[in-house]
Image: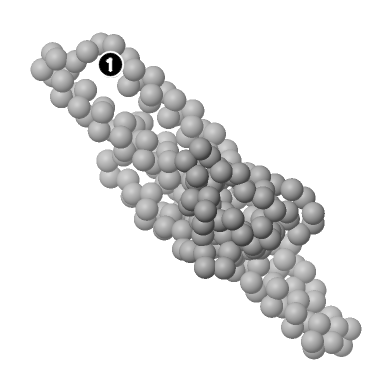
Amino acid sequence: MQAENHQDTVWTPVKDTYGRDMGEIVGIIFDLKGGIESIGVRESGGKFVIYSGKRLAKHKSYFVIVPEWRTEAQTLAKEMETLAKRERALEELSRSNDADPKVFEEVLAQIAAARVSYERLRMKIEYRLKEVESLYQSVSDFIGIAKVQHASSEIDEASYLVTAEFGRVEMEADARELDELRRTMGFLEDIEKAPLPSTAGLSPIEAVLPATEI
């Protein structure tokens, strides 16, 4: 995304991967190559938030912000795949007594770093999972009460339909994210059972997290 293509994007709507409205762009910072380094977003409540350009995708009429946990999961999966290849290569070299001890130690250090990244990501996903589950339940409870009050004529038809439609859209978005969070957690649990960085027999992350639709 080059600077000359995004000079008129102030006030462009921003949504997340699941279609939730996140606010409007109030500024863009470009890197030295003219790509988007970060964007400033004003949320509906007036809060100002900065998002990395690495998490940004462009739709015809709005921008999409990919969840941080999602990008980290995809990055971790790619790193593990590379480490697995290096581990197998070192095993082959070790069998032929041609392995460099220094390189071997470097790969072990990289594996240790991958474990730390995995633990951070797992905690982040656990937190987000609980957060979205709570949001989903709150909307469900609210819609349930509105339905009762509509049936008792305390809420008119037009007002109830607005509430019900909001609830439907929000709960569908929550359900999509919950599905991906749970599948990613399952992927991480499979990794935990297997010694890092080996990924033999594990489903590829692409099967767990489909490409962002824009």
Q: Residue at x 39, y 41 (%)?
A: 77
Image side of residue 88 versus residue 79, left or right: left
At label 1, the amino acid type is Val
Please say if 104 is above or below 7: above
x, y (%) of residue 60?
A: 52, 68
Residue 28 x/y as whole percent = 62, 48
Please state which of residues 39 and 156 is positioned toward the viewer in this rendering.
39
Count of marks overlaid on the render: 1
Please provide percent x and percent y for residue 171. Answer: 64, 67
Residue displayed at 80% across by 74% down: 145
- Residue lying at 41% horizontally and 54% vertically, measured from the top left: 208
View extreme (front): residue: 4
Q: How is the image coloured?
A: one colour
Given the current orientation, which residue lies at the most extreme right position? 154
> Regarding mark 1 in the picture, which secondary structure is present there?
helix
Left or right of 114 in this view: 45: right
Taking the image as drawn, is residue 151 in sight?
no
Instruction: Note whether 116 is above or below 122 in the view shown.
Output: above
Residue nearer the viewer, 26 or 213: 26
Asked if 183 appears above or below 164 in the picture, the reply is above
Residue 91: which quarter of the image? Answer: top left
In x, y percent, where is residue 49?
70, 47
Q: Which of the pair 123/189 is nearer the observer?
A: 123
Left or right of 106? Residue 132 is right
Name the residue rendered at 42%, 29% in the picture.
114
Establish if 214 lies above or below 85. Answer: below
In-front residue for pair 100/172: 100
Q: Is residue 74 visible?
A: yes
Q: Which residue is mark 1?
A: 103
